[in-house]
Image (cartoon, helix red, strand yellow):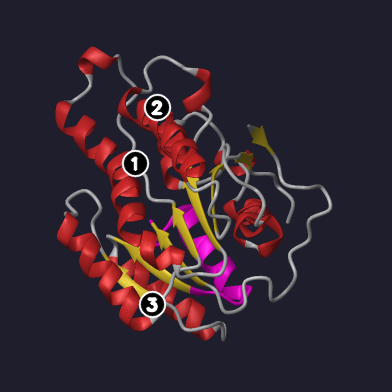
Amino acid sequence: MNTTIPDNYIPQESCLQGKIILITGAAGGIGSIVSRTFAGYGATVILLGRDTKGLESLYDEIEDAGYPLPALYPMNLEGATDKDYMDLTRTMEKEFGRLDGLLHNAARRDALTPLWRVNIEDWFEVLQVNLNAPFMLTCACMELLRASVSASIIFTTDHQAREHHAYWGAYGISKHAVDGLMKTLADELENQPSIRVNAIDPGAVKTGMRVKTYPGLDPNIMTKPEDIMCSYLYLMDEISRDVNAQIIYAQATI
């Protein structure tokens, strides 16, 4: 089912107080904004990404703001193996003992082209980052998520997963699969109410990926990532603990 957050939702200042949340693709775009936002509402965020300098800069911003001290975990999802994911979860178990939130935000795009002209290396890399990595990371983190009183898993989807446009290649197909992954996992965890699983569609948000995909559009008319943070907060907030298997369309509400 596709929906939006309640019109009357207003995040409380401490709605994420004490939560431990892992965010992939944290170094830029929506990832950096949502990381700062979650930290600002009380969460300890684990910043995962391949851009070490970007992660360090974000770490400094969060620390300077006086928010809970974040954790850094540089990792390139394109080449990550089972051992890499196991090492990550062992580190989180040692440092935190549980995981209250997992946001799959990292993404790769390939060129807009007919399927028969898709570069095979791009195909594998896009599916690795957009589909295989969320699957592998979720599986690796499951016991840490089970250790939480109330955990939220959020996948990132796209309208291309439901509108079936031509030329969207591996990216569009990966988002079809992500929706299926989310719904299958949500159904399997339906009788375990301590873990909820949903997806968020950010929409046409001003990010580097969006500007590159639509070079002819004026970036000044695009929605800023800061303006859709209520949707992310809602899915991590305890107020959404009964929301499961939903695709949330982000709205500019802040």
**To which residue does mark 2 refer?**
172
Q: Verify whether residue 26 appears in magenta.
A: yes
Q: Amino acid under label 3?
A: Ala
Q: Position of residue 26 (x, y in %)?
A: 41, 61
* Distance between the alpha carbons at the discs numbered 1 and 2: 10 Å
Up-down: is 168 above or below 187?
A: above
**Quarter of the image with the C terminus in it:** bottom right
Crowding at mark 1 (Cα within 10 Å: few <14, some 14-19, many 20+): many
* Distance between the alpha carbons at the discs numbered 3 and 1: 23 Å
Identify the element where label 2 is drawn: helix
**Residue at horizontal 50 percent and vertical 67 percent from the top:** 100
Crowding at mark 2 (Cα within 10 Å: few <14, some 14-19, many 20+): many
Counting residues from the start of the chain, the first of labels 2 and 3 encountered is 3
| Disc ID at residue 23 | none
Query: In which quadrant of the rendered view does residue 11 lie?
Result: bottom right
Q: Amino acid under label 2?
A: Gly
